[in-house]
Image (cartoon, rainbow, N blue to C red):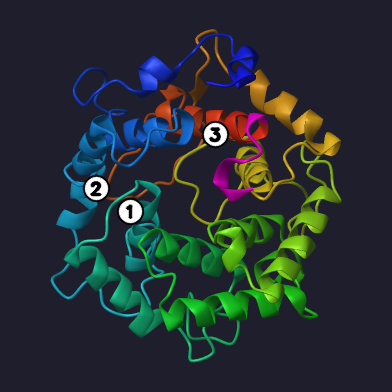
């Protein structure tokens, strides 16, 4: 391991690696074990422990609870676009399953096909509703990142989606969103960049590269700790400062740091305050607590106010990328 561990008050990786059933039920998740082995310890896919952890993900409680609620035709709650109700409709389950590291099975393929059929316009944009403003940047970034995780990178429908998102970012609207009263949205910028970051650098066309540049420029044009981005709601959302999992359309300082780091900008001196803010939240055992988690989900992802394997994993991912600029294809 690299010297990024020197920034920790203690090493939490043994805690992240604890196998299923060893500790409190709410936080046990083989997904965390898998990502700790691969992202932090750099174990190869052929490693026996990696294979074991990966196989256990699909049988884990969060994944099973989500899949148990799925209808045979691939949707949750009701057929259609699948954005509402939050956070039990179809689109959200595709996002959550990708976050959990689920593998592409027939059930997940049915869910993705349902999204393609009912929630994507001919121009490639994914929509939250059929209205003129149904295509929002955060939704498209989230879905594209999730579909890339499930191996749809060569699918022409995903390619159209990426083309639409890049064109939207590079056009006159940029990151503006009607939910933010037509002002540029930092949450949307982070979600768009997360999708682009999921593409290997060699596979990013010029339009995507341009969109990445615009997104990075926008996010770095403000102090992440002050978060004085344009707001149509009278100030900064307190969720920007709360670390959580999963994040839905919400973003925060931690996710922003991780996305920027994965795109090769984590060492920008302008981020020093944000990294210090992140480090200030660790406890004496080098763990981070769950400060936010969406309500009304099929599965639980931890207990708010308690140490979170997911949040700790993401904080360590940030530190790992900063210490290893060759990681994630950089």
In which quadrant of the rendered view does residue 195 lie? bottom right
Is residue 125 shown to the viewer in this render? no
Is residue 59 one of those drawn in magenta? no
Q: Nearer the viewer, residue 295 or 282?
A: 282
Q: CA distance from mark 1 to mark 3?
A: 19 Å
The residue at the point 33 percent across, 23 percent down is: 17
Q: Which mark is residue 176?
A: none
* Residue at the spot of label 2: 63
262 with respect to 211 (left or right): left
The residue at the point 55 percent across, 13 percent down is: 283
Earlier sequence position, callout 1 versus callout 3? 1
**Which span of residues is magenta-colored?**
323-330
Q: Are marks 1 and 2 in contact (CB under 8 Å)?
A: yes
The residue at the point 23 percent across, 32 percent down is: 48
Please tell me whether residue 94 is drawn above or below residue 264 in the rendered image: below
Residue count near mark 2 (Cα–Cα under 10 Å), binned few <14, some 14–19, many ≥20: many
* Residue at the spot of label 3: 317
187 with respect to 313 (left or right): right
Earlier sequence position, callout 1 versus callout 2? 2
Q: Residue furthest bottom?
A: 122
Element assignment for label 3: helix
Element assignment for label 2: helix
In which quadrant of the rendered view does residue 157 lie? bottom left
Element assignment for label 1: helix
Is residue 229 shown to the viewer in this render? yes
Please tell me whether residue 131 is drawn above or below residue 236 in the rendered image: below
Residue count near mark 1 (Cα–Cα under 10 Å), binned few <14, some 14–19, many ≥20: many
Residue count near mark 3 (Cα–Cα under 10 Å), binned few <14, some 14–19, many ≥20: many
């Amino acid at each position: 391991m690299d010297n990024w561990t020197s920034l920790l008050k203690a090493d939490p990786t043994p805690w992240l690696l604890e196998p299923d059933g060893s500790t409190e039920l709410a936080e046990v998740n083989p997904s965390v074990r898998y990502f700790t082995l691969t992202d932090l310890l750099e174990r190869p896919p052929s490693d026996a422990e990696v294979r074991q952890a990966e196989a256990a993900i699909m049988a884990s409680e969060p994944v099973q609870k989500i899949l148990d609620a799925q209808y045979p035709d691939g949707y949750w709650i009701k057929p259609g676009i699948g954005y509402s109700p939050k956070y039990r409709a179809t689109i959200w389950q595709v996002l959550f399953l990708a976050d959990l590291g689920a593998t592409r099975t027939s059930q997940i393929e049915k869910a993705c096909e349902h999204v393609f059929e009912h929630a994507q316009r001919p121009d490639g944009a994914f929509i939250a509703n059929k209205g003129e403003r149904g295509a929002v940047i955060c939704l498209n970034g989230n879905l594209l990142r999730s579909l890339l995780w499930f191996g749809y990178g060569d699918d022409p429908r995903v390619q159209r989606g990426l083309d639409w998102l890049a064109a939207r970012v590079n056009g006159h609207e940029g990151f503006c969103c009607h939910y933010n009263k037509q002002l540029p949205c930092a949450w949307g910028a982070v979600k768009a960049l997360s999708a682009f970051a999921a593409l290997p650098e060699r596979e990013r066309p010029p339009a995507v590269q341009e969109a990445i540049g615009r997104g990075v420029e926008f996010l770095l044009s403000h102090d992440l700790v002050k978060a004085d981005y344009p707001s149509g709601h009278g100030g900064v959302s307190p969720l920007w400062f709360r670390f959580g999992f999963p994040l839905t359309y919400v973003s925060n300082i931690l996710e922003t740091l991780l996305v920027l780091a994965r795109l090769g900008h984590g060492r920008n001196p302008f981020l020093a305050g944000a990294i210090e803010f992140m480090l200030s939240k660790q406890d004496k055992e080098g763990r981070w607590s769950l400060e936010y988690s969406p309500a009304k989900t099929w599965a639980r992802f931890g207990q708010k106010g308690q140490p979170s394997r997911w949040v700790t994993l993401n904080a360590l991912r940030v530190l790992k990328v900063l210490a290893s600029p060759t990681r994630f294809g950089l």
